[in-house]
Image (tube, rainbow, N blue to C red):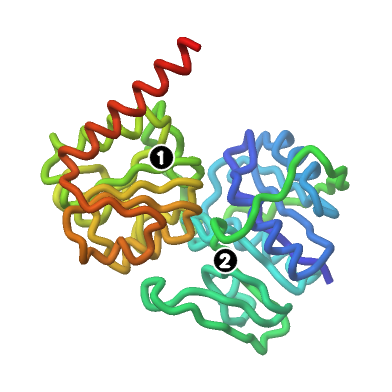
Amino acid sequence: MPALVIAQHDNRRLDPATLATVTAARVLDSAVDVLVAGHGARAVAEEAASVEGVRRVLSSEAEHFANPVAEDLTELVLQVADGFDAILAPSTTFGRNLLPRVAARLDVAQISDVVEVLAPDTFKRYIYAGNVLCTVRTKDSRRVLTVRTTAFEKAATGVGSAAIEEVPAPPRTGLARFVRREVHRSERPDLTTARIVVSGGRGVGSKENFQLVERLADVLGAAIGASRAAVDAGFAPNDWQVGQTGKIVAPELYIAIGISGAIQHLAGMKDSKIIVAINKDPEAPIFEVADCGLVADLFKAVPELIEEIERVKRERSAA
């Protein structure tokens, strides 16, 4: 039987995390269906139908799916679950909230934060704050998985032509209700999907000094991240936190400024393609994972780096 991917979306577009989850599902089974629950989300269903490798899109429309709570969405997943051997969702707040409920109702063990699919019943995932990569084999006949989306390439869109089938929505459970969503808006790229991320740590020293991290991010067109130590110290807001208890990122370039490299932080960024570290402590653990390390005073090195980048950009503009 095919695998089912639960789509994460905003009723307008698919979240890129869903595309990576489709890639993981295709390793499990060549036939992949996508469940889109929303309100006025026909465009999302059509986008899902165009994703490479998707066989069928199950679309369920209801007013209470405009901002679905996990309690209501679980009933929909259970309604269609009998046709699938595997149910997957991205390892985001959305998936981590939903799939444990689904697994409990199906009486199976959920496998979280999968980074590699070895066989239909065997997976790799990190444990101990990302310090150990373990192989897990399940004896359950039905697998319920959350996928670390930074570990998988995003499936291509605009190339498929899957069928869209309507699925009746179960009634609202009344167990929980959506109140409001507070979204931090920024002109900078989204932290979890940015090609370049510049992060600052406790070594930056203060909230005022953190502007140096922001300046470098702006000249590079990058997103801004922070270590938990920097967030706890009040240097940066919570939604910038990268790490085990923050956001998991895997950009093409990750620049760590004044970050020592605690394992909790490394768990959130060590899948980055290129890691650059700037720290005055040559023994800082961050240098163990860095592709390029600079042992220097960040207050001298970063302004010089910004100046050089701006010079190169001016020369290219003049040419």
Check disc 2 and give the amino acid type.
Thr
Say which residue appears at 22% left-offset and 39% top-offset: 301
Q: Which residue is mark 2?
A: 146
Q: Earlier in the sequence, mark 1 or mark 2?
A: 2
The answer to whether residue 197 is above or below residue 134 is above
Dot 1 alpha-carbon crowd within 10 angstroms: few under 14, some 14 to 19, many 20 or more: few
Q: Which residue is mark 1?
A: 180
The answer to whether residue 111 is above or below residue 296 is below
Residue 256 on image: x %, y %: 31, 50
Q: Quadrant of the N terminus?
A: bottom right
Q: In front: 184, or 70? A: 184
Check disc 1 and give the amino acid type.
Arg
Q: In front: 135, or 84? A: 135
Say which residue appears at 46% left-offset and 10% top-offset: 318
Residue 178 on image: x %, y %: 46, 46
Q: Is residue 80 visible?
A: no
Q: In front: 281, or 139? A: 281
Residue 219 on image: x %, y %: 36, 27
Is residue 233 found left or right of 41 in the rendered image?
left
The answer to whether residue 5 is above or below residue 133 is above
- Distance from disc 1 to disc 2, alpha carbons, whole Å, reads 25 Å
The count of marks equals 2
